[in-house]
Image: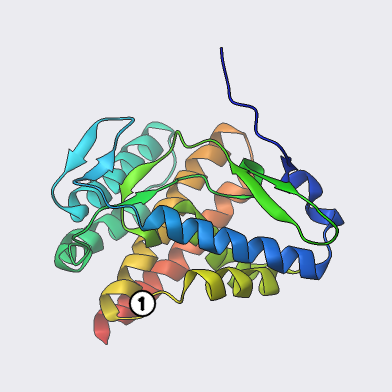
Amino acid sequence: MFQTFMAGERWLDKAEELTQKENSVLWQQLGHIAKDIHSIKGEAFGSPILGTFSTYWSTQVLSRLASFVEQLKAAQLDATDVQTVQEIAHTNSALLDEIQQPRLLHGDLWTFNILIKRDQEHPRITAVLDSDSCSWGDPMADWTMFLMHIKMTEGTARNDSSAAQAFWQAYGQPERSKGALLREQIYRASHFAQGRLDRHRQGRDEIVLRTYGKLREILATLQSIKKD
């Protein structure tokens, strides 16, 4: 197997050594990189790896949720909450289809897939790795955006809040219309459903249980958005 050598060290492995200033600089760089990736336009929604393309964004979202429901049931896990999200998404497919331009999503853009170099307190990102989860869709559905939301609202690690602020300062604040808020919650539910499956396969039952609480919060928020 031939691979291109990329200089740098994995950000995740060096995270605890970074000062707050270095931390903010790198998160700003990540915001710019994510924005650059999301600026690339595609011709159809879906995954080039799986070959699942469609004209409408709602088709991809609904298909993903339906797949999670099927897999959760096969794993003998309660999928009622994910199924309810699927029904809400179907009812509001017109709001999902406000996204008409497919954009490139990395799918796994986070510190474990990024190399950095520290040059006299001026750290820089030198490489982005592992693009085998890439797809075409709504940038706000990308895995990075899900994790940034958690870092901003639930972060407990050192510098979580300042990291999220630095990222969004560079990336730009997301749209806050009714459609955007509803889509955000549906995407979050989809990511938590994926997390439920992954943690179940890893035998991490405490995290599996936690996803049910997260889905309850999301469903309450979705009901609130629908009433407004």
Q: Give the image location of residue 73, x and y in percent.
A: 36, 37
Give the residue at the far bottom of this rendering: 228
- Going by the numbered disc 1, the residue's amino acid type is Glu
Q: Give the image location of residue 207, x and y in percent.
A: 61, 49
Identify which residue, 224 or 59, lies in the foreground: 59
Q: Residue at x 35, y 49 (%)?
A: 104
Which quadrant of the figure has residue 70? Answer: top left
Quadrant, the C terminus: bottom left
Identify which residue, 32 or 182, lies in the foreground: 32
Give the residue at the far top of this rendering: 1
When the figure is inspected, residue 135 is found, relative to residue 149, above or below; the finding is above
Q: Quick one: label 1, few (<14), some, or many (20+) residues within 10 Å?
A: few
**Residue 158 visible in the displayed image:** no
SS under mark 1: loop
Q: Give the image location of residue 89, x and y in percent.
A: 24, 61
Q: Residue at x 57, y 40 (%)?
A: 199
Identify which residue, 86 or 6, lies in the foreground: 6
Q: Residue at x 14, y 66 (%)?
A: 94
* Residue that label 1 marks: 175
**Residue 123 visible in the displayed image:** yes
Side (left or right) of 145 relative to 126:
left
Side (left or right) of 161 relative to 217:
right
